[in-house]
């Protein structure tokens, strides 16, 4: 949490020719701060927030570790993610979100980055605002096979419209229980 580390990356496309002159800009990791609100107010309970990298870098340890490193918001809804390396990210919400809440928007510099995500560079970014709203939906059901028997351990996925599928917060996934039942929670209206 103190000194940080330096990290660099460059995108290259390897074809049939040798590649030379590749320059890799090395930047220090930075801290990314933000605030969580619920219906415009401070949340009653802490909300766990992280950043998830949005490219093939997710296979690298530094990025996969970051995406599992949730930080809880404080009593005022503020949070700080430390030592974030440069890259394209989306905000992710950790487990424990009350069932009646959903992510309504994620904003930075007065613009929505909920679907598009945000780019972290070597510059300290403007704070992120994670806007939660009450009124989340729930979808319940039973998965049955062709004979009408419950299917145990089936994966049920609720997916957003195609134009919003880069936003993983809009996907909901659950496994069926021993009776074939499933419950999906924290679903945004729509």
Image (cartoon, rainbow, N blue to C red):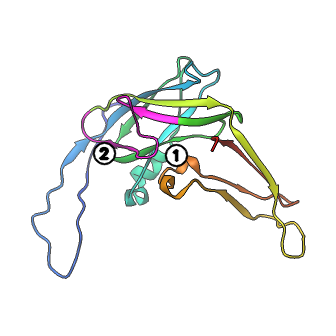
Q: Is residue 20 above or below residue 104?
A: below
Determine whether, in the image, residue 88 is placed left or right of residue 179: left
Determine whether, in the image, residue 180 is placed left or right of residue 160: right
Q: Residues in magenta? A: 105-123
Q: Compare residues 164 and 47 and report the one nearer the observer.
A: 164
Sequence-earlier tag: 2 or 1: 1
Distance from label 2 to label 1 (Cα)?
A: 17 Å
Q: Which quarter of the figure has residue 29?
A: top left
Tag shown at residue 68: 1
Outermost residue on the left side: it is 21
Q: Is disc 1 placed on a helix, strand or loop?
A: loop
Locate residue 120, reporting x and y percent. 32, 41
Determine whether, in the image, residue 24 is placed left or right of residue 133: left
Locate residue 177, reporting x and y percent. 82, 57
Q: Is residue 139 above or below residue 129?
A: below
Residue, x 53% and y 17% (percent of image)? 76
Q: Is disc 2 placed on a helix, strand or loop?
A: loop
Q: Compare residues 84 and 41 and report the one nearer the observer.
A: 41
* Foreground: disc 2 or disc 1: 2
Outermost residue on the bottom side: it is 16
Locate residue 92, reporting x and y percent. 52, 42
Magenta stretch: includes residue 15: no
Q: Compare residues 121 and 115 and report the one nearer the observer.
A: 115
**Label 2 crowd bin: few (<14), some (14–19), many (20+), radius 10 Å:** many
Q: Which quarter of the figure has residue 60?
A: bottom left
Locate residue 132, reporting x and y percent. 57, 31
Q: Which residue is mark 2?
A: 86
Magenta stretch: includes residue 110: yes
Outermost residue on the front side: it is 190
């Amino acid at each position: 949490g103190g000194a940080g580390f330096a990290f660099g990356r460059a995108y290259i496309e390897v074809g049939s020719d040798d590649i030379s002159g590749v320059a890799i800009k090395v930047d220090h990791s930075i801290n990314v701060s933000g605030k969580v609100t619920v219906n415009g107010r401070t949340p009653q309970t802490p909300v766990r927030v992280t950043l998830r990298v949005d490219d093939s870098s997710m296979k690298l340890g530094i990025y996969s570790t970051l995406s599992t490193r949730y930080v809880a918001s404080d009593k005022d809804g503020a949070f700080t993610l430390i030592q974030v390396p440069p890259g394209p990210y989306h905000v992710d919400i950790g487990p424990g979100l009350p069932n009646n809440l959903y992510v309504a928007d994620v904003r930075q510099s007065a613009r929505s980055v909920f679907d598009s995500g945000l780019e972290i560079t070597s510059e300290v970014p403007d704070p992120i605002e994670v806007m939660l709203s009450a009124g989340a939906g729930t979808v319940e059901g039973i998965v049955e096979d062709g004979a009408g028997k419950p299917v145990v351990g089936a994966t049920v996925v609720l997916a957003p419209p195609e134009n919003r599928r880069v936003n993983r917060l809009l996907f909901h996934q659950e496994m069926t229980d021993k009776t074939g039942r499933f419950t999906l929670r924290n679903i945004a209206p729509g």
